[in-house]
Each structure stands twice: as C-alpha cells, then as structure tokens.
Amino acid sequence: IGDVVSIRGQREVRDGGRLPPGMKILFEDASLLVIEKPERLLSMGSATQRDKTAYAVLTEYVRRSSDRGSDRVWIVHRLDRETSGVMVFARTEAAKRALQAHWDETEKRYLAVVEGHPPADHGVLRSHLDEHGPFKVYSAARSGRTRHAVTHYRVMKRGATRALVELTPTTGRRNQLRVHLADAGCPIVGDRKYGAETNPARRLGLHAGVLQFTHPRSGALVRFESPLPHDLARLL
C-alpha cells in the first residue's frame, strides 16, 4: 500500500440540481463514486421505498452522464437512513467485489453527539448483539443468536449536557454504534429507539466522517472525509 492520498471533491457535480438536498459528490473516477449522504435518505431500496434512495439517485446520475445510458452503480455498504456522511459506491462489479473482499480492513470513523457523557475520555465498548428482531437490536448474553461487536471511542468535546464522540467500529453489526452508546448510558441525540430523551436537531446525531481503504484499481490508500454537519455542530 502506498502513501495515504487525501481526496475531497476532485470533480464537481455535473448536474447537482437533480441530487437530493444535502447530497454531494466527493469523488468520482472509473471505479468509485463517493458521496456525502444526507440524513433521512435510504442507502438502497426497501419494501416500501425503491425510488428515493441513494442507489437510485446515483444510478440515474451515471446514466445521464453516459453515452450509452446504461451505466449503473453497485452497492458496497450501507448507512442507516437516519445517518449522514461518507458512502462509497462502485462503478464496476469488479470494484465492488474488491472493496467488499477487504471491507473489514476499511477504516470507518463516525462522529456522534450524545446525551450525557461516556464513562471515560476513551475506551472500548464490547457486547454480543442479537440482531434477529426486525425493529431493534439488543446486547445479550453470548449465544447462537448473537454476534460479537466492538467499538473504540474517543471523546472529542464535552459540554454541560452533551458530548461529541468519535467512534471507530472494528465490527459491522446492525445498529452497533447506537446500541453501544445507549448501553454506556449516553444515547445518541434524537435516537428515541435506543433511549434518547432529546431531539434538538430533529435528526439522529450520527455522522459517518471518514472512510479509508485501498483503491480497488490503483492500489493507493485513499481517504475521504466529511465534517460534522452544522446542525449537529451547533449543539456543542
């Protein structure tokens, strides 16, 4: 792996007026399409919503810019609908396979505004998560139904009633960060599903701030960053 290459917005959006409010193209080449996803936008289709998704929007975007009009994108990973931040889509199936084959090696960092304060300035949150429920994930005793989950955290800023926490998960379980912070007694603001009592920004206070991985074609180590959105930053 070569030196880290920091990339932010190397190409402007060609037709930004058709992108959902808050979505930005951070980077685009023949293999990758990296975006900032706004909150309240699904990553991909569900049983009740197929059109208004990041996947559908980007598929339309690449087809408008293609002479053939048949280009598409491939889903590499997901963010919860309520979570904003950096997402990568593949422009080819080969790139998708390469990224997913090494996804456990990808560095993922999130920023969360939480109620209260974590137990220490930094540490590791661990539990076994039961993901079988369709609505909510729980920490539970280790069993055949659970999967081990690990999240490293660091407090970036403390306020009187809230804190800004950087989270680095080393596993990728459903709702992992939300459950771990709730278990630690500091749920993410706006996360009523996991015990939050306040919703000052009228959104979930979770943002995917960093993705760093090996480019599937060049082999360079690339890094994409997105700052904490203003509506969350002002809470601190």
Image: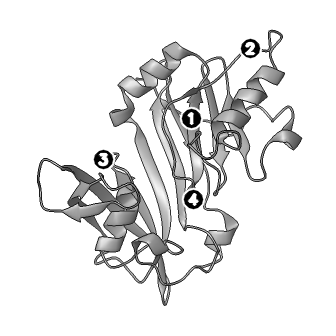
Assess whether mark 2 and mark 3 are in contact (beta carbons under 8 angstroms): no
Assess whether mark 4 and mark 1 are in contact (beta carbons under 8 angstroms): no
What SS does tag 3 mark? loop
Left or right: 16 as drawn, with respect to 72: right
Earlier residue among tags 3 and 4: 4
Residue 156 visible in the displayed image: no
Give whichever of 26, 50 is nearer the camera.
50
**Residue 70 — which label?**
2
- Residue 121 in the image: state x and y as whole percent: 33, 73
Assess whether mark 4 and mark 3 are in contact (beta carbons under 8 angstroms): no
Nearer the observer: mark 1 or 4; the answer is: 4
In 3D space, how far apart are the residues under numbered discs 3 and 2 (Cα atoms)?
36 Å
**Residue 82 — which label?**
4
Which class describes the residues within 10 Å of circle 1: few (<14), some (14-19), or many (20+)?
many
Which class describes the residues within 10 Å of circle 2: few (<14), some (14-19), or many (20+)?
few
For the point 65% across and 46% down, the residue is 36
Assess whether mark 2 and mark 1 are in contact (beta carbons under 8 angstroms): no
In 3D space, how far apart are the residues under numbered discs 3 and 4 (Cα atoms)?
21 Å
For the point 18% across and 50% down, the residue is 145
Amino acid found under the numbered disc labelled 2: Ser
In 3D space, how far apart are the residues under numbered discs 1 and 4 (Cα atoms)?
17 Å
What SS does tag 1 mark? strand
For the point 33% across and 56% down, the residue is 133
Earlier residue among tags 2 and 4: 2
Earlier residue among tags 1 and 2: 2
Reading the image, the residue beneath label 1 is 88
Give whichever of 139, 158 is nearer the camera.
139
What SS does tag 4 mark? loop
In 3D space, how far apart are the residues under numbered discs 1 and 3 (Cα atoms)?
18 Å
Reading the image, the residue beneath label 3 is 170
What SS does tag 2 mark? loop
